[in-house]
C-alpha cells in the first residue's frame, strides 16, 4: 500500500511500507508544468508506486528519458514508460 500526503502545495510524499523488512521507502512528486518524480525505492515496488502516482498526475508527463524522473540509484527507470 502507498500512503500519499500533500506535504506542500503541489508537492506529494508517497510512502511504501515493506512489512517483511519493517522499512518504509519515501518518494516525492512535484506536480508542476515540468513535474518531477523522485523515486527512492526498489525497482520491484515501482508498479505499486506508479498506480498511486496515476491518481495525482497523467503518467505520460513523466518520462524516464528526461529530467522529470530522478532516482536514488543510477539505474534507468524504464518501468515509468
Image: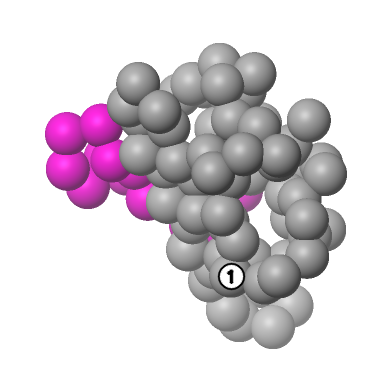
SS class of the residue under badge 1?
A: loop
Image point (81%, 41%), residue name: 79
Q: Nearer the viewer, residue 19 or 36?
A: 36
The answer to whether residue 11 is magenta is: yes
**Residue at the image point whose x is 56% and y is 21% from the top:** 61
Q: Which residues are magenta?
A: 1-17
In this rendering, would 79 be left or right of 2? right
59, above or below 40, in the image: above
Please tell me which residue lies in front, 81 or 19: 81
Closer to the camera in the image, 46 or 76: 76
Viewer can see residue 48: no
- Residue drawn at x 28%, y 40% is 11
Magenta span has 58?
no
How many dots with numbers?
1
- Give the percent coordinates (x, y) of residue 18: 66, 69
Q: Position of residue 7 (x, y in %)?
A: 22, 47
Mark 1 sits on what residue? Answer: 72
In the rendered image, is residue 1 in sight? yes
Give the farthest residue toward the bottom. 21
Residue 75: % across, % down: 78, 65
Residue furthest out toward the front:
66
Nearer to me, 74 or 46:
74
- How crowded pointer 1 is (Cα within 10 Å; few <14, some 14-19, many 20+) is rated as few
Residue 58 in the figure: left or right of residue 13: right
Q: Main secondary structure of the magenta part?
A: strand
Q: Position of residue 17 (x, y in %)?
A: 58, 65
Amino acid at each position: 500500500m502507498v500512503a500519499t500526503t500533500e506535504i506542500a502545495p503541489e508537492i506529494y510524499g508517497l510512502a511504501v511500507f515493506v512489512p517483511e523488512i519493517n522499512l518504509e521507502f519515501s518518494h516525492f512528486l512535484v506536480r508542476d508544468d515540468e513535474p518531477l518524480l523522485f523515486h527512492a525505492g526498489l525497482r520491484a515496488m515501482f508498479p505499486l508506486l506508479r498506480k498511486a502516482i496515476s491518481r495525482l498526475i497523467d503518467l505520460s508527463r513523466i518520462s524516464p528519458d528526461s529530467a522529470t524522473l530522478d532516482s536514488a540509484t543510477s539505474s534507468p527507470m524504464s518501468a515509468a514508460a
